[in-house]
Amino acid sequence: MKNEYDVIVVGGGPAGSTAARFAVEQGASVLMLEKDRDIGYPVRCGEAVSRAGIEEFIEPDDAFISATIDKFGMVAPDGTEVVLPLEQIGYVLERRIFDYEVAKLAANKGAEIVTRAYVNGLLFEDKKVSGVKFEHKGEQHELKAKVVIAADGVESRVGRWAGIKTYIDFREMESCVQITASNIDVDPNTLLFYFGKDVAPEGYFWIFPKRNKSANIGLGVSGEIGKKKSAQKYLDEFMNNHYPNAPFLTQIAGGVPSSITLEKISAPGIILVGDAARQVNPLSGGGIVSGMIGGKIGGKIVGKAIKNNDLNHILTYDKAWGDRLGKRHEIFDRIKDGIYNFSDEKFNSIAHAFVKVPFEKRTLGKLFKTALLNKPSLLIDIAKVFIVK
Ligand SMILES: Cc1cc2nc3c(=O)[nH]c(=O)nc-3n(C[C@H](O)[C@H](O)[C@H](O)COP(=O)(O)OP(=O)(O)OC[C@H]3O[C@@H](n4cnc5c(N)ncnc54)[C@H](O)[C@@H]3O)c2cc1C
């Protein structure tokens, strides 16, 4: 480790690694600090992405692809199942390998990475962030940086330490639980979504297939619903009803900020990327690709600011993010508000309308038109935002 860096990135998830990579590519000296022992582990994610989404950053590789997705399935509350072919394929990843590979892209360009490094405070100079405090191997350290990139995920504290308003309403924080189960008999190429008040009120229930008959199975419910009945209870009931004998390989719980991006994601000496900035797509809950996009935009801007010795340039990041995705997320957020209030009858009627279209004619475009008759453009968007960037 040097005594000082141009850029310190806090958090080695996909957003942090991507920010590190694009900052280092501009010639900045970059250090990324990750609190866990391993990059990419533990995994708290359904792992679904669009191919187009990840291709912007990394060549798809079998090493980190667990399943290839070409269909979207919807199960209505009355059990009607409709499967739509997707025009653009997607993947269910092995994130413990994917995150590792994304971090290597930064490391191979020259970024330094230290794991087991827990950032527990910020340094300030003239009210401007000027570095981090962190614990590593039982010792407390302080390191200066021209810019800190907070990529510390959903539970982010770094932004708050910098005085940025990171609070989001608990109703917008989806509380999610998921298991990875094996010996599950599902179509290996379909992302399956269940809707309805008995399985996932104001949210959805997912089954994302993985290789060798395993699948990520979980749900997210809003903070409001979770107060009455926990997501874990819904998951237990579903598994007892559908897969009572399936062995569980992993069990996780985590929050997904299903909100629009924070009002401010930069301040003197610091920017926020990924979940820390609330860059998750609020409709789908997908945050891998959007976090990497945030990381790319942020990393490039920070790198440029350092190259040109113009640190105020980092404050252009908010607008650049808004133009690329932030404004789109505002639309998704409005759609989410509409869809989460659909009654069971509404979901049933949408499924009944879709099911009449022969499978081979179910192109997204045609189904989109059919969908609009019943106003379910919102449902198609769910497929699109998971599978299309
Ligand atoms: C149950 C569940 C299912 C999901 N399913 C999907 C899905 O199917 N598709 C999708 O696209 N998204 C999904 N998401 C969302 C996705 O996981 C996140 O949006 C994504 O991981 C965000 O990436 P990130 O780099 O911002 O944060 P993270 O991946 O959370 O990385 C943050 C990193 O920062 C580290 N860190 C935190 N604090 C500190 C500190 N103080 N010092 C040092 N390091 C620190 C953490 O250890 C972590 O490694 C899901 C989330 C959940 C909870």
Image (spheres, rainbow, N blue to C red):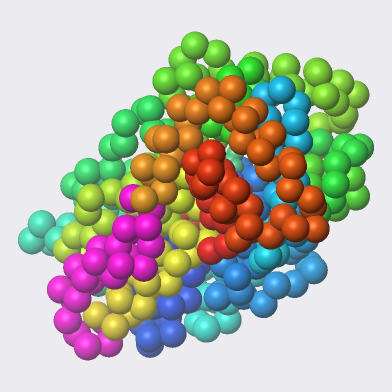
What residue span does the magenta drawing correspond to?
306-330
Q: Residue furthest top?
A: 228
For image coordinates 63% across by 57% down, the residue present is: 366
Where is residue 341 shown, x and y percent of the image? 45, 27
Whether residue 126 is visible here, answered yes or no, is yes
Left or right of 231 in this view: 330: left
Image position of 382 with respect to 241: above or below: below
Image position of 347 with respect to 123: above or below: above
Whether residue 14 is visible here, answered yes or no, is no
Query: Quadrant of residue 3 in the image?
Result: bottom left
Front residue of this view, candidates 175 and 389: 389
Total marks in image:
0
Where is residue 112 shown, x and y percent of the image? 49, 73
Where is residue 29 shown, x and y percent of the image? 38, 80
Front residue of this view, candidates 309 and 372: 372
Where is residue 183 shown, x and y percent of the image? 91, 37
The N terminus sits in image quarter: bottom left
Q: Is residue 317 magenta?
A: yes
Left or right of 21 in this view: 191: right
Image position of 26 with respect to 356: above or below: below
For image coordinates 75% across by 31% down, the residue present is: 80
Dominant secondary structure, magenta: helix
Front residue of this view, candidates 369 and 167: 369
Query: Quadrant of residue 388 in the image?
Result: bottom right
For image coordinates 81% across by 32% down, the residue present is: 248
Left or right of 274 in this view: 195: right
Image position of 174 with respect to 282: above or below: above
Q: Is residue 276 magenta?
A: no
For image coordinates 47% across by 76% down, the residue present is: 21
